[in-house]
Image: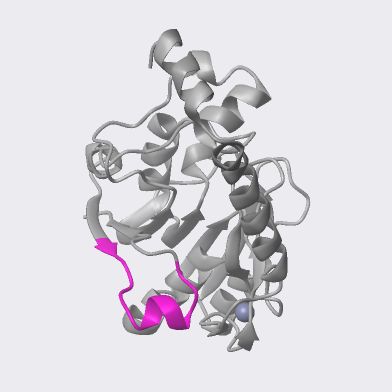
Amino acid sequence: MTANSSSSYEAQASVKDRLRPYVWTLRNGLRTIRFLFGRFPRECSVCGYKGRFFAYGNPLSLGINIDSLCPRCLSHERHRLLALFDKERDLFSGRSILHFAPEKGLANYVRSKKPSRYVTCEYGGRDADLDINIENIKLNDGEFDMIVCCHILEHVDDSLAIPELYRILRKGGQLIAMTPVIEGWQDTFEDRSKQRTTEDRILYFNQHDHLRFFGSDLRERLRQANFEVEEYTAVEPEVSKYGLIRGEKVFLCRKP
Ligand SMILES: [Zn+2]
């Protein structure tokens, strides 16, 4: 729109027209407050809770999800999606598992499935069994049957991390990779010049510590490390029942 057409719009717009976006935004903001502690009753596939979920939004990111957080086990949509997948595939029982940045509810869920060995890890954290830098893992080749890696790859150099994850899996072992993916983008967006400041990272990557938004080429990045990639997503009625994000994926990556 040119400067001229913009000012002509301003001249023609009534006071009501100009106030409308303010009214809509305030009204929707008040509705959001009303539903902070739940809109619909849901069910948690992680802990079995039935009832209202709380809204969740990272204060350092943009947006808030209504009916996101299980008030009993603190699961989010992605954890409930993974637990649903596990109910189909029995991913954890009897297997040796390494869990990166373990979320409490999901960690308890995995333990309840009686893995043969369950090791948690975090980079620089104190609440896990091991302190591991995913880009340079100080573990032997082929140590684990299964790796759980939820919302990690968007924070790190995935070109280093994915081959390391492949290396520490035994032959036939599997990586569970979950990360935000923009399916409409062929190519991952990770412009380094947009990663320098907190404000830029929030603006371009939606969170202060994100380094990229993966596009649909995430699959190719996983395959380049020799993984065989399988995908799981939930459909209705499970999506509404368990409060999931439509189209969210679990990538199950097998080391052949
Ligand atoms: Zn729960």
Quadrant position of the C terminus in the picture: bottom left
Q: Is residue 82 magenta?
A: no
Residue 131: image location, x then y, percent? 68, 45
Is residue 62 in view from this perspective?
no
List the single residue furthest toward the right.
Answer: 126
Q: Nearer the viewer, residue 254 or 217?
A: 217
On the picture, is 202 further left or further right than 3? right
Q: Where is residue 127, by image quadrant?
A: bottom right
In the rendered view, tell whether residue 48 sits above or below residue 211: below
Q: Where is residue 15 shown, x and y percent of the image?
A: 61, 37
Quadrant of the picture in which ligand 1 is shown: bottom right
Does the rendering let one see residue 114? yes
Q: How many marks?
A: 0
Vertical placement of 5 versus 76: above or below? above
Residue at 74% of width from left, 46% of height from top? Answer: 125
Classify residue 82 by image quadrant. Answer: bottom left
Q: Residue at x 49, y 64 (%)?
A: 78
Percent x, y for residue 51?
Answer: 63, 87
194 vs 209, left or right, is: left
Q: Nearer the viewer, residue 229 or 131?
A: 229
Residue depicted at 23% across the width and 43% down the height: 223
Split into 4 quadrants, where in the image is the N terminus?
Answer: top left
Q: Outermost residue, top direction?
A: 3
- What are the residue bounds of the magenta stretch? 231-244
List x then y, in percent, for residue 24: 59, 51
Between 176 and 178, which is closer to the camera in this rendering? 178
Coloring scheme used? one colour
